[in-house]
Amino acid sequence: MFRLGLIINPIAGMGGAVALKGTDAMAERARQLGAVPLAGERARAALGELVGLPLQLVTVAGEMGERLARELGFACEVIWRPACAETSAEDTRAAAQAMCAAGVDLLLFAGGDGTARDLCAAVGAGVHVLGIPAGCKIHSGVYAVTPQAAGRLVARMVRGELLSLCEGEVMDIDEVAFRAGRVRTRHYGELLVPQDLRFVQAVKLAGREHASLVLPDIAAEVVSRMEPDTLYLMGSGSTVAACMDELGLENTLLGVDLVENGRLIGQDLRADEILERIAGRPCRLVITPIGGQGHLFGRGNQQLSPAVIRHIGPEQIMVVATKAKLAALGGRALLVDTGDEALDLALEGYRRIITGWRDQVIYPVANPR
C-alpha cells in the first residue's frame, strides 16, 4: 500500500494577512494582530482529493497532521510527537527524518519556504517531497500550484501513473530585510519532486520517445554516476547493453557482467561467482525491467539470486528504462520474483527509474496479491 507522509506546519502563512510578510519568529505577533492558522485548511483541500484511495498515512501528532487525518477518516500511523503544544522547526526536521527512515513513498507537507528549508536540511534527496502551498513566501520550486493540484498529483502516484522526478530548488528570502523593503533571496538546496511526465530530450514527432536517441542518454547518465573502486554488476537487456557501449566494453546481452573503474573484470557470471567476487566490496547493480511484462528479477536473470540481491541491498540497485517501456505497462507495477517472499516484499515501493540524462521518473514495484 502507498505510504504517504504528512507534515503540516500549523503556523505557516499566519503572517501574510496581517502584513508581517512572513511568519518566521513572528507567530505570536501574528496572533496578537488577529491572524488565524491557514495551513490546516490548505492541507484539508489537498487531502480531500485522496479520500477513498488505498493509502496509509504516516504523520505527526496533533495539529501537525494527525487531527486532520483522523477527521477525514484516514487510517494513520503517528511517527512523531512534538514535546510542546507550540511546535517548532525542530519538530518538522525530526518528523521528516523519522518518515524517511520509515520508508514513506512521498512526503507531503503544508507550509512555506521556511518549511521547505527545514525539509531540505533534514532529508535532502532521501525521500520524494511535494509541497502544499500554505506559507506567505512560496519562492521554492517544490510546491504544487494549488492545494487541490497537490492532492491530484498524489492521487496519480497512488494509481501508479508515470510521473517525472525533478529537482526542485529550495529558495527563501531574508524576512527581516524584506520587511525593510529589501529582497535578499538565497538558494538552500534541492528536493526531489514528482511532476507531470516530461519528455525533456531525445524525442521525435509529437513528443514520442525514440529509443535510438534516448538509450545513449540513459547510458551517459548511468556512467556519470559510477564511482571509483566500486563494483558494478551489469544486468541483462538492451538498455543495460547501451551502458556497456558507453563504457566501450563487451557485453553479455543475456547475462550478468562485472565492471570496476571502467574495466570489464567478469563476464556472464554465475550466482556463486558473483557472490565470491563481490564479498566484502561496495557493489551496485544496474538492471532494466523486461519489456511488456515488467519483471525486474526472476525472469532471465536468476544468477541475481536472493543472496546476491541481499548483499547488494535494495538502495544500491539502479533501475534503467525508457519512458516508452514503462508507459507500455499501462500503469501496472514492476514485478519481482526472486523466490524469496521476504526479499520480494523488501524490494517493493516507489523506485526512482533513470530514463535519460539528468532525467528520472518514479514508478511502483509491487507484486499482485
Image: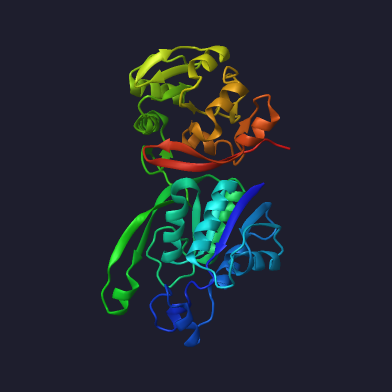
> Does any portion of residue 22 appear in the rendered image?
yes
Query: Outermost residue, front direction?
Result: 83
Q: Quadrant of residue 46?
A: bottom right
Q: Nearer the viewer, residue 77 or 285?
A: 77
Left or right of 264, for residue 368:
right
Give x and y (percent) for residue 95: 55, 57
Foreground of the two, 128 or 145:
128
Q: Residue furthest left?
A: 182
**Relative to 272, residue 40 above or below:** below
Q: Is residue 106 above or below residue 265?
A: below
- Horizontal side, residue 87 vs residue 227: left or right: right
Which quarter of the rendering shows the C terminus? top right
Of 65 and 302, the residue lying toward us = 65
* Residue drawn at point x = 69 percent, y = 60 percent: 74
Identify the residue at horizontal 58%, vertical 36% (top origin). Answer: 329
Q: Is residue 256 above or below residue 167?
A: above
Please name the colour scheme applied to the rendered image. rainbow
Q: How many marks on residues?
A: 0
Task: Identify the residue at the far right of this view.
Answer: 369
Residue 153 visible somewhere in the drawing: no
Q: Position of residue 14 (x, y in %)?
A: 48, 77
Q: Position of residue 158 (x, y in %)?
A: 61, 50
Q: Quadrant of residue 213?
A: top left
The residue at 59%/72% (across/down) is: 85
